[in-house]
Each structure stands twice: as C-alpha cells, then as structure tokens.
C-alpha cells in the first residue's frame, strides 16, 4: 500500500507532457518510480529502466492531433450512447411504475365499486351472484331500500335448483298477497361484498315480463355503507 502511494505521488510530481516518453525504474529502496526526465534516473538503474511511450508518439504532429481528435470524438459518442441507454432505462422504470399505479388504482376501483344499470325512471338494477349448494346464478335485482328482504323470482330459484323452504304469503304493492317461500342460501355477492348463508324469499311471479329478477333488500344493503354514482352508473362502497 505504501509503495502504491509513492508511485501515485511520483506521477503527480512528474506530470507527463503531451507526446513525450516517460521512464519507469525501481530505486534502491525497491520502490517503483516514474519520471519524464531521463537525467533523473540513477546511473545504477539505467540498464533496468522501462521506457513508456504515449499513443501516436510515432506519428507526425498533424497526424497525431487528428488521431487524438478522432479518439476524443469516439469517446464522446460512447458517452452519448451510455447516456441515451440510461435515459431509456429510467423511462422504462417510470413506465413500469405508472403501470403498477394504474393496476393498483384499477384494483382499488373494482373493489370499491360495482357497475349497475340505471333505467330511464332511475331504477337501479344490480348484478347479484346467488349461490345454492353447488350452483351459482347471476341475477339482476332491483335495489330497493324499501324492501326489508331480498326477493328472487321463482325462475331464478329453478335455475339454482332451490326446493322446499318455509311457505307463506307476501303482501306486494297494491296490497295483493302472493305465494312465497323463505329459506337460506349459500351466499349472496354484489361486487366485492358477500353475505354468507343469507335468508331470501322466493316469489311466485306472474304478470308482464319484468326487467329485473327480484329485489335487493335491506337485509343485504344495511350491512354496508354505499352511495350511488349516477354519472358513472356504479355503487360506491364506503368503508
């Protein structure tokens, strides 16, 4: 380490002039030494001296200058290419970060919102997944905060394979009584929100074709805080 420092010091003390030779020898203390003055070499070391020449020393001054300029231009181009590659790398990292951020925002949006269909008379039709035993059916239920229970029409119950249930009658709008069954199912899911083993009502529906398959009532809705974004046609779930 000491010898290395001395060698570096020698280089500092004896700066090399452009286009000149410089000499390397080992002094009497075993230290490798450099000098650009031939007269500074101890006579005892003259036979063992190594002569170093700079590049292009054998060329004429004009050719040497041209080669030095060409070399400088080549190094400048290499540095330029490195800078361009570094900028491309930074841009790639930035784009990758943007993609991750967009994916995170998309996931967050999907978890916190549920697309719905809003009709001309402001009826909100919600896609609902219903599970019963080993079957799952998606039905469009009308969001109804005035209904105490979730109701599905009997054709959805048939698709699920629902049978049995506690039988009774349900009073509908207008005061009419209709046949109904009450029973638990496996799950009810709206977007990212799920209720396990909810009780629902199966309604024997008759009449004109309905745009929805039942009602999504307060037995589900009261479990979650939400708002309706009419402009985007989504339910926004508020944690």
Image: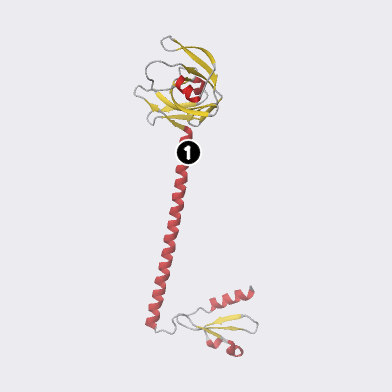
In the image, residue 41 above or below residue 72:
below
State how the image is colored: secondary structure
Identified at 54% across, 77% down, the residue is 11
- Residue at the right extreme, as displayed: 29
Q: Quadrant of residue 114?
A: top left
Looking at this view, is 22 or 227 the one in front? 227
Identified at 46% across, 35% down, the residue is 110
- Pinpoint residue 40: horizontal percent, then vertical percent: 56, 86
Looking at this view, is 77 or 20 the one in front? 77
Q: Which residue is mark 1?
A: 107
Q: Quadrant of residue 213?
A: top left
- Pinpoint residue 100: horizontal percent, then vertical percent: 47, 45
Badge 1 marks a residue whose secondary structure is helix
- Pinpoint residue 87: horizontal percent, then vertical percent: 43, 57
Q: Is residue 184 visible?
A: yes
Residue 17 placement, left or right of 70:
right
Looking at this view, is 3 or 160 the one in front? 160
Q: Quadrant of residue 88?
A: bottom left
Picture mark count = 1
10 Å crowding of disc 1: few (<14), some (14-19), many (20+): few
């Amino acid at each position: 380490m000491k010898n290395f420092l001395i060698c570096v010091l020698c280089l500092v003390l004896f700066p090399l002039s452009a286009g000149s030779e410089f000499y390397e020898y080992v002094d009497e203390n075993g230290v490798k030494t450099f000098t650009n003055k031939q007269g500074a070499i101890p006579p005892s070391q003259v036979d063992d001296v190594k002569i170093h020449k700079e590049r292009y020393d054998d060329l004429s001054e004009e050719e040497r200058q041209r080669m030095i300029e060409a070399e400088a231009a080549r190094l400048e181009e290499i540095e330029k290419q490195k800078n361009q590659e570094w900028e491309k790398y930074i841009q790639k990292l930035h784009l990758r970060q943007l993609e991750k951020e967009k994916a995170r925002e998309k996931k967050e949006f999907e978890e916190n919102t549920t697309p719905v269909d809003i009709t001309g008379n402001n009826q909100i039709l919600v896609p609902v997944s219903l599970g019963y035993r080993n079957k799952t059916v998606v039905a469009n239920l009308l969001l109804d905060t005035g209904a105490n229970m979730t109701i599905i029409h009997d054709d959805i119950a048939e698709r699920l394979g629902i049978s049995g249930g506690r039988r009774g009658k349900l009073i509908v709008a207008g005061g009419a009584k209709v046949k109904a069954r009450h029973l638990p199912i496996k799950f009810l899911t709206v977007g990212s929100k799920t209720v396990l083993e909810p009780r629902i009502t199966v309604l024997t529906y008759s009449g004109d074709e309905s745009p929805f398959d039942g009602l999504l009532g307060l037995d589900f809705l009261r479990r979650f805080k939400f708002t309706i974004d009419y402009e985007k046609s989504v339910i926004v779930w508020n944690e």
